[in-house]
Amino acid sequence: MNAKVVLFDELGGPEVLRLEQVRLDEPGEGEVQVRIDAIGLNRAEALFRSGGYYYQPTLPASRIGTEAAGVVEAVGPGVEGFSPGDAVSVLATGIDMSTNGVYGDRVNVAARSLLRRPDSVDAVTGAAVWLSYLTAYGALIEVGRMRPGDEVVITAASSSVGMAAIQLANHIGAVPIAVTRTAAKADRLMRAGAAHVLAMDEDDLVKRVAMLTSGRGARLVFDSVGGPGLAGVARAVTRDGMLIVYGWLDPRPAPLPMNWPLNIFGFGLNVVTDDPAALRRGEAFINAGLRSGVLAPVIDATFDLADIADAHRHMEANGQLGKIVVTVRH
Ligand SMILES: NC(=O)c1ccc[n+]([C@@H]2O[C@H](COP(=O)([O-])OP(=O)(O)OC[C@H]3O[C@@H](n4cnc5c(N)ncnc54)[C@H](OP(=O)(O)O)[C@@H]3O)[C@@H](O)[C@H]2O)c1
């Protein structure tokens, strides 16, 4: 059988991404073949494509992609619990994207990368939920022990993880303080559930957070921006709070925050995905939220797989609010 997959031969901008027909073998030991109906885009993939991720792609003909949803078409030897026809989400983390990337119309993935997708969850939602909500869940709830009443500063608030964090904070009864680069998305962030919105180019973050927290500072700061501003956001943390750093959207060097004592946690999703009990808790928490409707991925835009380069351009233009999804026609 053939599959249409996205490949790239050199590091670069969105234009390096190309679609190609490749041979798709039967699924191997422990693998499942999935017809992909929708693909969730993540900033990690733009970084991977351009050489800015934490490991480098194997070139030429590197694959790309982490997150998708579709239907099981075949199962390999040794796979239990999945059968052809099952609706699934794919969360292929902790593996090399160059060989296992999921941008394509059909892929073989390790069965452990699959999550069941209830009938009520369509493919677009199923491709948009897991990476961002599990990241927000793992960081804020498993690591940060977010509690009702906690003020939580969320930078890059309109990112797919930021939007998930706003919903999670509201669900727990915490107070999400959204931080965004300019005021352009402020109204939309308020409508999306932010209790307060701070614009980095207009507000003195530390002063405003102090005002909003009766001088205490926030119990949690959830930051994916890093860069020279890191020392500033760190000063918004209350003394017994925690700065959770989980990205480097600003690739410039970040100074070590010096407002000690300060708890800094560098969060990786493997905190959750490598711990079966934490993963089970995260899945249960997020599935319950999806069922009740309190958690619902905000879809910024959808693109066709043929327009994958445009989808990456859209991601890197930073105009989004929520998740960008690519749909696949069969
Ligand atoms: N550690 C982990 O396990 C883990 C897991 C998932 C994601 N991540 C990281 O989380 C971050 C968000 O990922 P995502 O896929 O949700 O991103 P995304 O949806 O592409 O986020 C884009 C948003 O980030 C903000 N932004 C972009 N560039 C910025 C810059 N230079 N300075 C400040 N803000 C900037 C903008 O929001 P505003 O317009 O609101 O400013 C933009 O709309 C990435 O750094 C990603 O690598 C880490």
Image: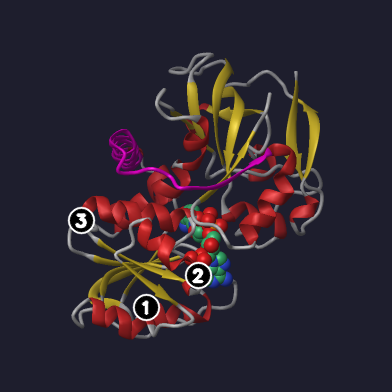
Residue 234: mark in rendering: 1
How many labels, in total? 3
Residue 71 to residue 321: above or below = above
Between the C-alphas of marks 3 and 1, the distance is 23 Å
Q: Residues within 10 Å of mark 3 (few under 14, many from 20)?
A: some
Q: Position of residue 201 (x, y in %)?
A: 49, 81
Q: Is mark 2 within 8 Å of ligand 1?
A: yes
Q: Quadrant of the C terminus?
A: top right
Amino acid marked by disc 2: Ala
Residue at 62% across / 43% down in the picture? Answer: 65
Would residue 157 appear left or right of 66 to someone viewing this image?
A: left
Residue 28 to residue 157: above or below = above
Q: Is mark 3 within 8 Å of ligand 1?
A: no
Q: Is residue 166 magenta?
A: no
Residue 103 to residue 254: above or below = above
Q: Quadrant of residue 64?
A: top right
Q: Mark 2 = which residue?
A: 184
Q: Quadrant of residue 205?
A: bottom left
Amino acid marked by disc 1: Ala
Q: Position of residue 295 (x, y in %)?
A: 34, 44
Residue at 45% across / 49% down in the picture? Answer: 132
Amino acid marked by disc 3: Gly
Q: Quadrant of residue 315?
A: bottom right
Q: What is the span of residues highlighted in magenta in the rendered image?
A: 277-304
Tell me the element at label 1: helix
Q: Mark 3 = which residue?
A: 173
* Residue 249 in sight: no
Residue at 25% across / 50% down in the picture? Answer: 171
